Amino acid sequence: MIMNTPLQNRFETQLKALTGFDFQDMVIKIFQMKYGETGFTDIRHQKDKGNDGIVESEKRIIACYGPEETQNTAKRQKGFETKAKGDFEQYKTHWQAQYPNWSIVINHEIDPQYDKIVKELNDKSSVVGISQLLTMVANLKNHQRRQLGAHLRIEAEFFSSEYLREFLDDLLQTSKIRDTSILYDSKSYVPARKKMELNYGSTEIQDAINEFEFLSESGALKQVDDMMSCYEDEEIDRMKHRILYDYSNQTNGSFKERLKQLSEFYLGKYSSNNDDDYLHYIRAVLINLFEQCLIGLKQSKNNDITSSRK
């Protein structure tokens, strides 16, 4: 996920606003999501002795420091030094023999003075600042970010465009450069209603129309067009080829069945099988390309359509 967006700003604002134990609790949630249940040990309910959590694979102990944002630089540096030295002494006494690495996690940017303080304690010690935390969040799975966003009380609308961007970026990353472009032939365009009649059974058409109208009225189809326009032509070609390939090789049966299979394939590959929001945008992309005659039939014969608009 590329988090140079309003969503990144919202995560940053909310994380910076957390202090004390509230910040520590959120750091632990982020580390648990990043490293997994067995990869990160939370020992908050014990006497921590300078230990707020253990990254097992890295043999690393973390401590958390979340001061008030209103502190001036001098006061914050002094508070950091006191916290770091105090927690490190506890860590050195009780944990260093088993866990040689130590980090202190903070709710703001890393001050150059912080590195100096920490490296004087131990050359295997480090500072994890707000930028590093945001990178961890950016690399989480989509449903994990949504769960974290709920904990941080981030409004759902901040996630909508990110889901779509994620899916298109995921498609792009798994696509190869192609020599041929998929060009749109306006003469081959078939109205959406007509295409539905050609591709769905008589009892399925109304459901297909309902889905198309919902995606259109909710703005999802327009979001697809708008987001696709942000990519280079070569990147759009690669995404289209990826979908064509997967449609041909990952699905079979009727068009409805193939659309369902392809949606579930992408959902399982790129997100979580229970992520309805991500599925919504997968369907929007596929229906958008169906409307463009990229997939599905446009004639009464059994021909697959291989033309689309850019």
Image (cartoon, helix red, strand yellow):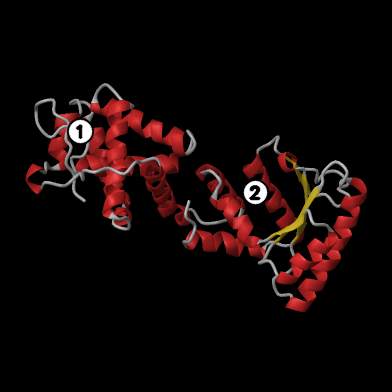
SS type, badge 2: helix
Please state which of residues 219 and 228 is positioned toward the viewer in this rendering. Answer: 228
Residue 295 image position (x, y, % from top left): 22, 36
Residue 48 in the image, given as x and y percentages of width and height: 86, 48
Is 77 located above or below residue 254 in the figure? below
The CA distance from mark 1 to mark 2 is: 42 Å
Side of 53 where 222 appears, left or right: left
Q: Residue lying furthest top in this view? A: 253
Q: Which residue is mark 1?
A: 296
Camera-side residue of 49 and 103: 103
Q: Hey, what amino acid is under mark 1?
A: Gly
At x 46%, y 53%, the residue is: 159
Q: Amino acid at mark 2?
A: Ile
Q: Which residue is mark 2?
A: 30
Query: Contact, CB < 8 Å: mark 1 with mark 2?
Result: no
Instruction: Please state the horizontal and vertical placement of residue 213, each as a whole percent of the image.
Output: 25, 44
| Residue 268 quadrant | top left
Would you call the spot at circle 2 few (<14 residues within 10 Å), some (14-19), or many (20 or more)? many
218 with respect to 297 (left or right): right
Give the residue displayed 90% in from the left and 56% down from the top: 89
Q: Position of residue 17 (x, y in %)?
A: 66, 65
Q: Residues within 10 Å of mark 1 (few under 14, many from 20)?
A: many
Indicate which disc, 1 or 2, sits on the residue closer to the N terminus. 2
